[in-house]
């Protein structure tokens, strides 16, 4: 059974601070990892992807991956009220047919306090 | 690119009625996924297609649910008869491959309310 676990929150962070979102997954052969942002009443929007161990930076966002610990995180620097949303972690199964696609966590509700 | 297009955006129907949700994937994407999202269960994969062929429908809750993809640019999800517990937001997503390696692009969703 593939699982992706996230703390549901809410996670409250003051404006301008760093928001840290965490995700663990159970499938050791997973190869690609994603963070989606979902505003209330909207659809999930892909904001970050990461495939290798280490850090990947894109503007104010940094994704971190540790395959040995089966752990992926998202850091948001200089948090803005517009970052308030639910953040979904998604993980795919490994290759060799990998037909099961993405498994999503239930999301972490992030609130940026002005 | 217009993205993944779903219709209708909102649907309110009475229990027992047939409901049909529609999806147009991104042109060139050969994989299409139907998800259901509720507060309790999060995003659940119902069924997905690769090159218009249904690959895995193990997430379809019961026989009341059916999905088709007659061509590369159109898919439907049908619920017959509908029940109040089917109330949820239904998302369609498409991708250039079925493994999820490059992630998915979601449509805007259909909010279904069955009364």
Image (cartoon, rainbow, N blue to C red):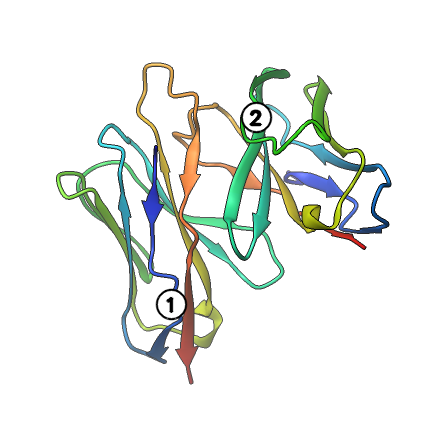
Q: Which mark is residue B69?
A: none
Q: Is residue B87 above or below residue B104?
A: below
| Residue drawn at 42 percent across, 24 percent down | B99
Q: In this view, does B64 lie above or below B53?
A: below
- Say left or right for A81 vs B19: left
Identify which residue, A38 or A46, lies in the foreground.
Answer: A38
Q: Specify whether disc 2 shares its chain with disc 1.
A: no
- Say left or right for B97 vs A72: right
Host chain of mark 2 = B
Identify which residue, A103 or B85, lies in the foreground.
Answer: B85
Quadrant showing the N terminus of chain A: top left
- Counting other residues with Cα less than 10 Å from the Cα at mark 2, is it few (<14), some (14-19), or many (20 or more)? many
Host chain of mark 1 = A
| Residue drawn at 42 percent across, 74 percent down | A111
| Residue drawn at 46 percent across, 70 percent down | A84
Quadrant showing the C terminus of chain A: bottom left
Where residue B69 appears, as percent x and y from the top left, is 70, 21
Q: Distance between the residues labelled 2 and 1?
A: 30 Å
Q: In this view, does A26 lie above or below A95?
A: below
- Counting other residues with Cα less than 10 Å from the Cα at mark 1, is it few (<14), some (14-19), or many (20 or more)? few
Q: Which residue lies furthest to the bottom in this view?
A: A114
């Amino acid at each position: 059974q593939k699982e992706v676990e996230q703390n549901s929150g809410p996670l409250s962070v003051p404006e301008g601070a760093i928001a840290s979102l965490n995700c663990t997954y159970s499938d050791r052969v997973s190869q690609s990892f994603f963070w989606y942002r979902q505003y209330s009443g909207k659809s999930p929007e892909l904001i970050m992807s990461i495939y290798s161990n280490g850090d990947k930076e894109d503007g104010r966002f940094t994704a971190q991956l540790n395959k040995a610990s089966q752990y992926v995180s998202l850091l948001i620097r200089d948090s803005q009220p517009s970052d308030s949303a639910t953040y979904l972690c998604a993980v795919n199964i490994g290759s060799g047919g990998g037909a099961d696609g993405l498994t999503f966590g239930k999301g972490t509700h992030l609130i940026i306090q002005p | 690119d217009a993205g993944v297009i779903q219709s209708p955006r909102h649907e309110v129907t009475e229990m027992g009625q047939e409901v049909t949700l529609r999806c147009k994937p991104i042109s060139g994407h050969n994989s299409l996924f139907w998800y259901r999202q509720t507060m309790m269960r999060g995003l659940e994969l119902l069924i997905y297609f690769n090159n218009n062929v249904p690959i895995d429908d193990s997430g379809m809750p019961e026989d009341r649910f059916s999905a088709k993809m007659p061509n590369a640019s159109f898919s439907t999800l049908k619920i017959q008869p509908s029940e109040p517990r089917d109330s949820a937001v239904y998302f369609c997503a498409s991708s250039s491959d079925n493994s999820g390696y490059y992630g998915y692009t979601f449509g805007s969703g259909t909010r279904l309310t069955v009364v």
